[in-house]
Amino acid sequence: MLDCKKLAIFVGGVVFGSAGFKLLSSRDAKKAYTQGTAAVLRMKDSVMDTVTKVQEEAGDILADAKDINEARAVAAEEVADEAATEEAKA
């Protein structure tokens, strides 16, 4: 009796698997796969556009930060030079 139950479950699984395979390989399923893939590709393009914009902005921020640091270094040198000049006069 137990073997018949296992055999019935196995046969049911094979039938269900075969039906599932036919369903997954149907024309409608292929259309759905194609539409899904197209949506993923559009999303990828959108993400890549966003990444490019973020990289450009990060480059601009980095350039501005370098300019600020260079200006501060020049100002610090001028202050040091003025202090040295004042010290030399005294």
Image: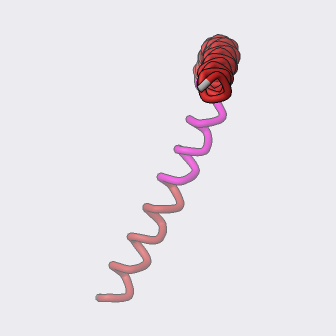
Where does residue 32 sit, x and y in percent of width and height?
58, 20
Image quadrant where residue 22 sits = top right
Residue 24 appears in which quarter of the rendering?
top right
Q: Using residue 2 as the reference point, say whether residue 21 is left or right of it.
A: right
| Image colouring | secondary structure
Residue 71 placement (x, y as % from top left): 65, 15
Q: Which residues are magenta?
A: 16-31
Q: Residue at x 64, y 13 (%)?
A: 64
In the rendered view, tell whether residue 63 sits above or below residue 19: above
- Examine the residues drawn in magenta and state their main secondary structure: helix
Q: Which residue is at the front of the view, 56 or 31? A: 56
| Image quadrant containing the N terminus | bottom left
Residue 65 visible from this viewpoint:
no
Q: Residue furthest front?
A: 90
Task: Please give the count of numbered marks on the rendered protein.
Answer: 0
Q: Residue at x 53, y 44 (%)?
A: 20
Q: Residue furthest bottom?
A: 2
Q: Position of residue 11 (x, y in %)?
A: 48, 66
- Compared to residue 5, the image places residue 73 above or below, namely above
Q: Nearer the viewer, residue 2 or 20?
A: 20
Say whether residue 38 is magenta: no
Residue 20 in view of the camera: yes
Q: Percent position (x, y) of residue 65? A: 61, 19
Look at the image and tell me in which quarter the C terminus lies: top right
Q: Nearer the viewer, residue 81 or 48?
A: 81
Residue 18 in the magenta stretch? The answer is yes
| Residue at image coords 39%, 71% | 8
Whether residue 37 is situated above or below residue 17 in the rendered picture: above
> Extreme left residue here?
1
